[in-house]
């Protein structure tokens, strides 16, 4: 029987995920900045599996003269491995970085994943530009040697050459776009959606207690928040984040979701969500309460099922038998 | 008894009345506010009603109105005039009771009327530039009486200036730097062409006009207020059209960068976040060291900004909507905390 849910633990986890997401934007963006600045070309050393017409990249291993970084396989959250297992498995490489939550020093998984690199000067760069919470990982005997001259790569393990791109904004893009990716934490998306809603506030409603916005309009603005290199598929996924954020805002009574003849309307209640300091802790708290209620319901249901299973089955005797 | 009907006034007639009134002895000060309108002047009474205050306009001439305003719940009133220069208004309020009541009623009214009517915030440098330009007027003397400095969270401090000591911008700036304080107001007497006027000029676009010699108000209007209005409009233009725009699918931003005189720390960013949270919806995405990422909504007019703070600069990045008025207000809030920042 699992333990009953704990709201403090749920809240803590949401906070860590929130920070990890924002750190990922900062750290990975800085990393991408670094790659661009130094015009690195990387080598794919393992063949990328092709599955159902698409390239799947679970074993992607990239190496430049001094750089080594991988994705998915070791940080994928969908598998059974925990982060420690994944770190353990990465021992085969020269150097890894483990990103830690600055408050708890607990290793944090970043998405999109990019977990290891070398040499030390990139740490200095990351420390200076993003002050990212990194720590040295393992140092083993990396023996792979690759000549750097393009076209003269002799090593058979090298599959292709490419310039590294990460799904993370460099500082310029971070200023232009909102980076509400499909795995963005709910409170993060909600704040951005709320900001977009307010930008649609017209002068005639300046001092009115509420104002209304068409859903179709906010969807348009929301889509403009993304950088152009986000695919239409990702955009579609992100639209579901918009709906989730709107439902969340509705549950907080900061907005009302209304239906009208001309389509879906969002009514923004002006007095909500203001004069409360930083809204993030409040949103995380509310999200934790919502999640706790959900988990508690599930827990109660599981408990009830278990009790009913444990109950001795009553066998209906036939009257004739009984008597 | 038939009621007395007064003929409508024109602006030159008003100036002439003010000249006469303020050159006599023991006059009460006149409060002048330079503000940016966001709506048509005729709709002010309706907006004032929605804001829980009051306003009555009585048209005198083209772009010129008698104005009566009421404080919240209409407890106190102030009377004066509104001169509509289309992009900027001057509101002149006469003192009837104690010298501060009219000014305070108007400040409170303006605060409630934001963003319909917005105060024209000035940079401390703007005030000093105006002082510099006055000091260069031929055959004139500029007598500084004092200036007001303020540190965040502390009461203002009036720095008195010896009567016979000439105005020195360098000395004021040195004191600001030494004490890390914001210049809020300058009180001075300006003498030219056989006349003079005494004024207190504030960064909030508020003037207190005390008294002077013949044609004192006309000269104040010509030499000071019109210059102030022009600078306010230049500032307004600088902060206008800064919204994020999408051009051929790419976002174009027009950020504003503020440079501090010394490196900003995490504690500075925390103070900034807490200060801004008093007047805006804020969301601190990253709390500093070295990067502050703060999303901010001006719930009054719907402008939205991201603030990126680094040790060496603060960047204000307007989002899809960002009015010049809201930006100016935001920058004045940042000045409160970091009085010596400069717009890069």
Image (tube, rainbow, N blue to C red):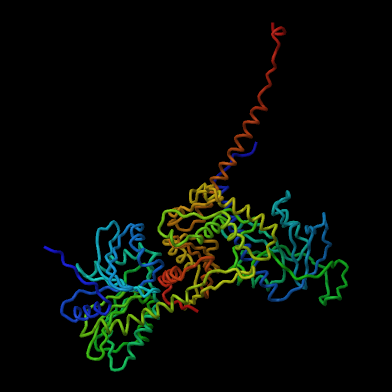
Q: Residue furthest front?
A: B2
Whether A134 is drawn above or below A323: the answer is below
Location of residue A158 in the rendering, given as x and y in whole percent from the top left corner: 84, 68
Location of residue B93 in the rendering, given as x and y in whole percent from the top left corner: 26, 71
Whether A63 is drawn above or below B342: the answer is above
Q: Residue at x 70, y 12 (%)?
A: A317
Q: Residue furthest bottom?
A: B139
For this view, does B336 lie left or right of residue A219?
A: left
For the image, the number of numbered tags is: 0
Whether B323 is drawn above or below A14: the answer is below
Location of residue A164 in the rendering, given as x and y in whole percent from the top left corner: 73, 69
Q: Quadrant of residue B233?
A: bottom left
For this view, does A236 lie left or right of residue B174?
A: right
Q: Residue furthest left?
A: B1
Name the quarter where the N terminus of chain B is drawn: bottom left
Location of residue B167 in the rendering, given as x and y in whole percent from the top left corner: 31, 87
For this view, does B157 lie left or right of residue A256?
A: left
């Amino acid at each position: 029987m699992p333990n009953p849910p704990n709201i403090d633990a749920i809240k803590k986890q949401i906070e860590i995920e929130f920070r990890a997401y924002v750190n990922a934007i900062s750290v990975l963006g800085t990393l991408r900045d670094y790659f661009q600045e130094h015009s690195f070309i990387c080598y794919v050393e393992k063949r990328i599996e092709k599955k159902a017409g698409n390239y799947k990249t679970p074993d992607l291993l990239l190496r430049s003269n001094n750089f080594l970084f991988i994705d998915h396989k070791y940080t994928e959250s969908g598998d059974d491995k925990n982060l420690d297992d994944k770190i353990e498995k990465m021992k085969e490489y020269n150097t890894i970085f483990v990103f830690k939550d600055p408050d708890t020093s607990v290793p944090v998984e970043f998405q999109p994943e990019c977990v290891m690199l070398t040499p030390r000067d990139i740490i200095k760069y990351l420390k200076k530009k993003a002050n990212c919470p990194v720590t040295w990982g393992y140092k083993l005997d990396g023996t792979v040697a690759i000549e750097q001259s393009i076209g003269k790569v002799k090593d058979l393990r090298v599959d292709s050459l490419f310039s590294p791109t990460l799904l993370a904004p460099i500082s310029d893009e971070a200023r232009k776009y909102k980076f509400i990716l499909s795995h963005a934490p709910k409170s993060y998306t909600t704040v951005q959606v709320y900001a977009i809603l307010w930008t649609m506030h017209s002068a005639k409603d300046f001092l009115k207690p509420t104002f209304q916005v068409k859903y179709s309009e906010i969807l348009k603005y929301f889509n403009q928040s993304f950088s152009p290199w986000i695919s239409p598929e990702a955009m579609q996924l992100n639209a579901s984040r918009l709906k989730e954020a709107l439902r969340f805002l509705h549950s907080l009574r900061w907005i009302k979701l209304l239906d009208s003849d001309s389509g879906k309307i969002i009514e923004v209640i002006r007095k909500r969500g203001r004069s409360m300091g930083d809204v993030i802790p409040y949103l995380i708290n509310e999200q934790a309460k919502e999640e706790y209620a959900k988990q508690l319901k599930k827990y109660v249901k599981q408990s009830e099922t278990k009790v009913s299973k444990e109950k001795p089955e009553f066998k209906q005797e036939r009257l004739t038998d009984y008597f | 008894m038939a009621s007395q009907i007064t003929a409508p006034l024109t602006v030159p007639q008003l100036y002439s009345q003010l000249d006469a009134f303020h050159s006599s002895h023991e006059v009460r000060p006149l409060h002048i506010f330079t503000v940016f309108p966001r709506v048509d002047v005729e709709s002010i009474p309706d907006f004032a009603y929605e804001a829980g205050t009051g306003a009555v306009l009585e048209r005198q001439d083209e772009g010129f109105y008698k104005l009566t305003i009421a404080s919240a719940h209409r407890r106190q009133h102030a009377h004066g005039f509104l001169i509509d220069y289309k992009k900027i208004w001057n509101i002149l309020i006469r003192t009837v009771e104690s010298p501060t009541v009219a000014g305070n009623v108007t400040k409170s009214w303006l605060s409630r009327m934001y963003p319909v009517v917005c105060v024209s915030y000035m940079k401390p440098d703007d005030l000093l530039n105006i002082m510099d330009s006055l000091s260069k007027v031929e055959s004139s003397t500029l007598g500084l009486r004092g200036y007001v400095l303020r540190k965040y969270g502390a009461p203002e401090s009036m720095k008195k200036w010896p009567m016979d000591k000439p105005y020195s911008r360098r000395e004021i700036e040195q004191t600001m730097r030494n004490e890390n304080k914001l210049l809020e107001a300058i009180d001075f007497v300006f003498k030219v062409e056989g006349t003079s006027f005494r004024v207190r000029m504030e960064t909030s676009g508020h003037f207190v006009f005390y008294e002077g010699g013949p044609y004192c108000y006309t000269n104040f209007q010509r030499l000071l207020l019109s210059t102030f209005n022009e600078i306010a409009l230049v500032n307004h233009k600088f902060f206008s059209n800064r919204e994020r725009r999408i051009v051929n699918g790419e976002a174009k931003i027009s950020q504003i960068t503020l440079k501090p005189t010394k490196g900003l720390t995490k504690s500075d960013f925390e103070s900034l976040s807490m200060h801004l949270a008093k007047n805006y919806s804020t969301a601190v995405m990253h709390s500093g060291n070295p990067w502050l990422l703060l999303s901010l909504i001006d719930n009054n007019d719907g402008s939205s900004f991201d603030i990126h703070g680094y040790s060496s600069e603060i960047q204000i990045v307007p989002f899809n909507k960002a009015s010049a008025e809201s930006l100016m207000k935001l920058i004045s809030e940042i000045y409160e905390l970091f009085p010596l920042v400069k717009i890069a």
